[in-house]
């Protein structure tokens, strides 16, 4: 199979933990260019994941002058929009890490650039490729749940605040858990519902634990003086067809009800949740029934040869789209709506009023 020539912009945590290992394992893409503001990071990435003659850059605009099939934008959230737009305008297909952008205006500009350039733009919502997500999406698309009129998007951690990089910086990231992990849960929920028409949003955003010390945090105590984003946020979203979505997100919350990148759906024929594995609840033969699908990775395949690792499937989908004219699963129009809703939750929390679309 013909290999894809690609460049990496941003050689930090998400590049090293998710994208580059999956690209290398899949073996269909040659990483021929690496860019990072810290040159040593780009060099280390090249040494581990790049071709022998891969080039190193500290200025992404220089990287974009190369002949490349695709570019991965894996920077802090603040830089997603302008780097992606420049890459699209340079004739490159782009996979941008989530969230799409800090603001809906930036996301819309990315969407416009993709449409104008005719190039592919997709966003890194890899949780769509999990076995439970794939199964539930098929059930929803088949109408097994009926009309889904109430849903919850779950992104709750008890004590797992990321203390590295720029996660605690509002300027660099645009927010805390809402834009970091809440975005995954909301994307998953809207995708299952196939519902992208919000009409109003109410939000509450809290920083109640960020100033504490001796936190028992999973990655060590955070520095309160650097913690300038929320530690939890919640949203109430009303859709045009009358459906309601509740979004809960937290890096630190005094609760034992912990779930991340999960959804609960309530329809007219059945309901579903990912609380304890995938469960589908319904009434059958006048009895309440709970189904637990067998999701053994050996029995369910999304793409032959890719296995069940969502990170691998994400790379396979992008490769197929760029090199074979396939469809992307995460469409930028969908990611744009996710960004609109996240922004509206922050805005509603500031004003104390609903944001109407």
Image (cartoon, rainbow, N blue to C red):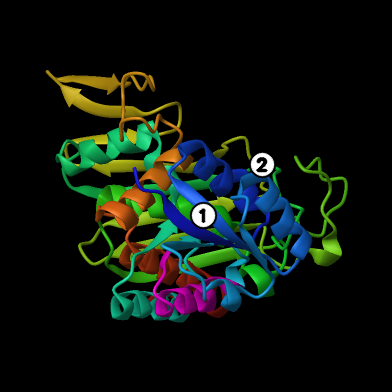
Is residue 325 found left or right of 91 in the rendered image? left
Q: Quadrant of residue 62?
A: bottom right
Q: Quadrant of the C terminus?
A: bottom left
Crowding at label 2, few (<14), some or many (≥20) Cα neighbours within 10 Å?
some
Magenta stretch: give its range.
79-94
Of residues 60 and 172, the one nearer the viewer is: 60
Give how far across and how far down residue 265 sits, in percent. 32, 42
Q: Residue furthest right?
A: 214
Give how far across and how far down residue 182 sits, in percent. 51, 54
Residue 93 located within the stretch drawn in magenta: yes
Give how far across and how far down residue 276 sits, in percent. 45, 26
At 72% from the left and 63% from the top, the residue drawn is 166
Mark toward the start of the polypeptide (1 vs 2) = 2
Give how far across and how far down residue 227 sits, in percent. 77, 63
Label 2 sits on a secondary structure element that is loop
Q: Quadrant of the N terminus?
A: top left
Using the image, determine if residue 220 lies above or below residue 272.
below
Is most of the magenta stretch helix, strand or loop?
A: helix
Q: Which residue is mark 1?
A: 182
At 58% from the left and 78% from the top, the residue drawn is 61
Label 1 sits on a secondary structure element that is helix
Using the image, determine if residue 144 lies above or below residue 13.
above
Numbered circles on residues, count:
2
Is residue 174 found left or right of 44 in the rendered image? left
Q: Which residue is mark 2?
A: 158
At 39% from the left and 22% from the top, the residue drawn is 297
């Amino acid at each position: 199979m013909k290999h894809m020539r690609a460049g990496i912009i941003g050689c930090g945590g998400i590049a090293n933990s998710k994208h580059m290992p999956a690209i290398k394992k899949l073996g269909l893409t040659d990483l021929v260019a690496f860019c990072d503001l810290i040159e040593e990071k780009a060099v280390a990435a090249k040494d581990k994941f790049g071709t022998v003659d891969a080039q190193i850059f500290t200025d992404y605009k220089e990287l974009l002058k190369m002949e490349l099939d695709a570019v991965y934008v894996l920077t802090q959230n603040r830089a997603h929009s302008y780097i992606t737009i420049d890459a699209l305008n340079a004739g490159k297909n782009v996979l941008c890490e989530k969230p799409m952008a800090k603001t809906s205006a930036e996301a819309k500009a990315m969407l416009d650039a993709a449409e104008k350039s005719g190039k592919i733009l997709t966003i890194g919502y890899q949780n769509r490729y999990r076995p439970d997500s794939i199964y539930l999406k098929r059930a929803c698309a088949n109408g097994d749940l009926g009309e889904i009129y109430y849903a919850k998007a779950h992104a709750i951690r008890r004590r797992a605040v990321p203390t590295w990089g720029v996660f605690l910086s509002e300027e660099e990231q645009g927010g805390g858990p809402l834009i970091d992990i809440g975005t995954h849960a909301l994307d998953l929920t809207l995708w299952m519902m196939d519902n992208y028409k919000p009409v109003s949003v109410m939000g509450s955003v809290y920083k109640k634990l960020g100033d504490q010390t001796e936190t028992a945090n999973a990655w060590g105590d955070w520095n309160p003086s650097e913690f300038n984003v929320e530690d939890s946020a919640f949203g109430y979203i009303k859709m045009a067809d009358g459906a309601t979505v509740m979004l809960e997100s937290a890096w630190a919350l005094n609760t034992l009800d912990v779930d991340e990148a999960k959804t609960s759906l309530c329809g007219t024929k059945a309901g579903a949740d990912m609380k304890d594995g995938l469960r589908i609840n319904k009434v059958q033969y006048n009895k309440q029934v709970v189904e637990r699908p067998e999701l053994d990775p050996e029995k369910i395949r999304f793409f032959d040869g890719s296995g069940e690792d969502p990170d691998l499937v994400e790379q396979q989908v992008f490769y197929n789209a760029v090199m074979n004219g396939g469809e992307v699963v995460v469409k930028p129009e969908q990611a744009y709506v996710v960004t609109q809703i996240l922004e509206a939750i922050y805005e509603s929390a500031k004003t104390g009023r609903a944001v109407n679309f």
